[in-house]
């Protein structure tokens, strides 16, 4: 018997008049880019990839459910995001620096 491994689906949506929002679930990562972040789509998408990798590295058991949150981009070059479950009862906080995002983009 063989197992089939498949990568989770990655979606980027650009709806009008919407806040930037990242949802990470067991089989999909969804990035909605708000109107205020239309010029940094690649950075937000890279952030979502970094978040998914951190979750898988630190605590892969939590990916049995969906997590979502809106990133807060500071002027000091870091992005803070609190991912919450659907019931808004559990949260995981992450901070990612802009230099880390640029480094990851250069690797690709």
Image (cartoon, helix red, strand yellow):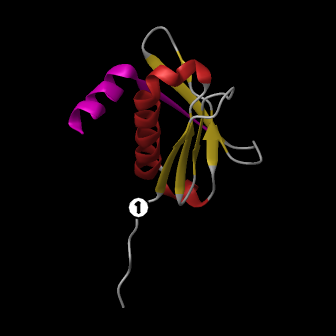
Picture quadrant of residue 36: top right
Question: In the displayed structure, does residue 66 sit left or right of residue 73?
Answer: right
Question: In the displayed structure, does residue 90 sit left or right of residue 36?
Answer: right
Q: Classify 47 as above or below 76.
A: below
Residue at which label 1 appears? 7
Picture quadrant of residue 65: bottom right
Task: Locate residue 52, reporting x and y percent.
Answer: 46, 46
Q: Secondary structure at mark 1?
A: loop
Task: Locate residue 61, reporting x and y percent.
Answer: 53, 59
Question: In the displayed structure, does residue 90 sit left or right of residue 105?
Answer: right
Identify the image quadrant of the N terminus: bottom left
Q: Classify 16 as above or below 12.
A: above
Can you see residue 33? Answer: yes
Picture quadrant of residue 3: bottom left
Task: Locate residue 87, reporting x and y percent.
Answer: 77, 47
Magenta-highlighted residues: 92-108
Graded by Cα atoms within 10 Å as few (under 14), some (14 to 19) or many (20 or more), the crowding at tag 1 reads few
Q: Is residue 101 magenta?
A: yes
What residue is rendered at 56% in x and 46% in y? 30
Identify the image quadrant of the C terminus: top left
């Amino acid at each position: 018997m063989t197992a089939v491994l498949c990568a989770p689906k990655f979606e980027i949506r650009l709806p009008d008049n919407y806040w930037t929002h990242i949802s990470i679930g067991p089989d999909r990562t969804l990035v909605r880019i708000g109107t205020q972040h239309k010029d940094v789509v690649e950075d937000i998408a890279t952030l979502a990839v970094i978040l998914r990798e951190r979750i898988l590295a630190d605590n892969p058991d939590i990916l049995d459910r969906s997590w979502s949150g809106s990133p807060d981009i500071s002027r000091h070059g870091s992005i803070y995001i609190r991912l919450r479950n659907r019931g808004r009862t559990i949260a995981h906080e992450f901070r990612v620096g802009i230099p880390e995002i640029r480094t990851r983009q250069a690797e690709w």
